[in-house]
Image (spheres, rainbow, N blue to C red):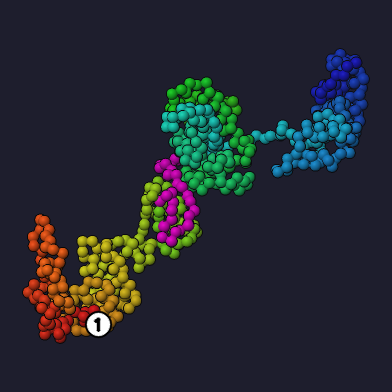
Amino acid sequence: MAFREVDMWEVLQILSRLGRGESNSSIKRATGADRKTIRNYAAIAAELGWTPDLGIEPDEALAGRVYARVRPGPDAGRETTIERVLASVGPQLAQWFKDEPQDPALQLTKVQQLLGRQGIDVAYSSLRRHAMKHYGYHDRRRVTVRMADCDPGEVAQLDFGQLGRIFDPITGKNRVLHALVVTLVYSRHQYVHVTHSQKLEDVIEGLEDAWRYFDGVPRRLIVDNMKTAVAKPDRYLPTFNRTFEEYARHCGFVVDAAVARHPTGKPHVERNIQYVRGNFFKGEDWSGADRDQVQQRAIAWCTETAGMRTHGTTGKKPLAVFRKTEQPALLPVPGERFDVPQWGDHKVHPDHHVSFLKALYSVPTRYIGQKVTVRGDSRLVRIYHDGQLIKTHPRKRPHGRSTDYDDYPAEKTAYALRDPKRLIGVAEKHGQHIGRFMTELLSGDFPWALLRQGQALLRLTDKYGGLACEQACRRALAFDLINVKRVEKIITKDLASAPLPTDGKPAKVIQIPLRFERDPGSFAHNTPNENGDSHGGNQTVAGHGPQTTAPVGDAADPAGPSGLRPQSPTQRTGVPGTDTAG
């Protein structure tokens, strides 16, 4: 007779009929069970403490215990032959089934092959049961759990997926088009942003458009471990990209990174990537369409097609659930779009500047040679040292420069500025006459050419003291000697204490007349030779008049025959303002 498997419900029906006092023959006709089987069920029930005489209706628990005794299969307490064979190679199996993150367990098919090489022929199902029972092995058909539903507006999931290629009019080539998909978990409503790259700027631009499409921001955003968002993946403490984390604070959401290489961490958007690729992009004619045109059609598709479909899990239309329940629960969208910054760690150069994005920005002297962190957006550049903001500059274009001259040492600021007024102001602080001297020095049409002399004058105050320099400048001004070297000579020769003119007018420096020791004839151009002719002949130059020698000195006091100018009494006694002025 062929074996017929029964279930617990058939056992319960037989026991119930026995309890009502029916005969075995009637039970056989009603259920089709053999009399031997009926007697066996009754005997097992009696062993378990139940008999028809008790007058108690049998329940499912009793029927289940009887069924457990009579169901086919090997006895759980009896060790089979294959169990004994596999137990003999237990240490080897334990090594093969050892599952570690860096050294995962071998596949069952591989273990089956290795056992076959040792002469052990075991079925795949038997090996799998043995591995699951003794070594905790689990294959790809793992036990899963369904996560609890989130609240409206709580979670959104983000992921990238490749759609295909379209023509890019900027490069003139066909380029890969990616889809950045943002899915609201509660309502399953989604937004698709198409882009040619997956840079940080593209991710933030897509999120900014998504928040404005939803007219709200979720409280938590789950992302995969893309480098634009996660700098260092970790199961428990991931390190997020500095700019993306700043963007999260700007919008008010919390970034939650899924576990690396575990797509089940964001299943809703993972499935939507395939849906977007298959339902929106594939099968459409994109010839002649650029990225902007694809983006417009993607927004319409999100609203009219994806939003109006009946979702397979929720059984509702995502757009309807979103408008009724989830949209009011979202956070408000920031009024101003996020200005994506760039960060960099740089060393301060000896010239007080740091180079950031090919532009120079100054910092105070005390930070020279130290590492600073620079943050730059489209408008401002902020410089930090040890987490403290130390400088802010307007953003400059490449090869530009922003310098705050107050960052320079005080003694170098005036020259670096090339500002005569500032140099004069510094001189006036050292003394009245020093300020007047600096004013006279830099009063010409091109004062920048004399800035070095102005710096030299200020250095004299450090070298000889402010009082000595003040007195020297006073004497130099009295004789109208606007020359820094002469001022230093006055100081070194101690001429500052000599008397000054008493009429209040600047003394004049008199040029000492020129005196020659040679005979005036030695200055003649034509000298007679032995024949009485001029040396070299009588030479004339066409187009010129007669050649004459220009007088030297004052025409009213020409040189005498002896070649020496007669000295006047004042010249013999000396005139103030000549040698005594320095």
Q: Is residue 513 visible?
A: no
Please identify the quarter of the rendering in which residue 549 is found: bottom left
- Residue 311, given in percent of the width and then of the height, sits at 56, 26
Q: Is residue 577 above or below residue 397?
A: below
Q: Residue at x 92, y 26 (%)?
A: 43
Does the segment drawn in magenta span residue 127?
no
- Which residue bears the numbered disc 1? 495
- Residue 228, given in percent of the width and then of the height, sits at 53, 42
Q: Is residue 142 visible?
A: yes
Q: Residue at x 43, y 53 (%)?
A: 355
Q: Does residue 280 appear to the left or right of 7 in the view shown? A: left
* Quadrant into which the N terminus falls: top right
* Quadrant into which the C terminus falls: bottom left
Does the segment drawn in magenta span residue 348?
yes
- For this orientation, the residue located farthest to the top is 29
Q: Characterize the magenta stretch by its predominant secondary structure.
A: loop
Give SS at disc 1: loop
Q: Which residues are magenta?
A: 330-359
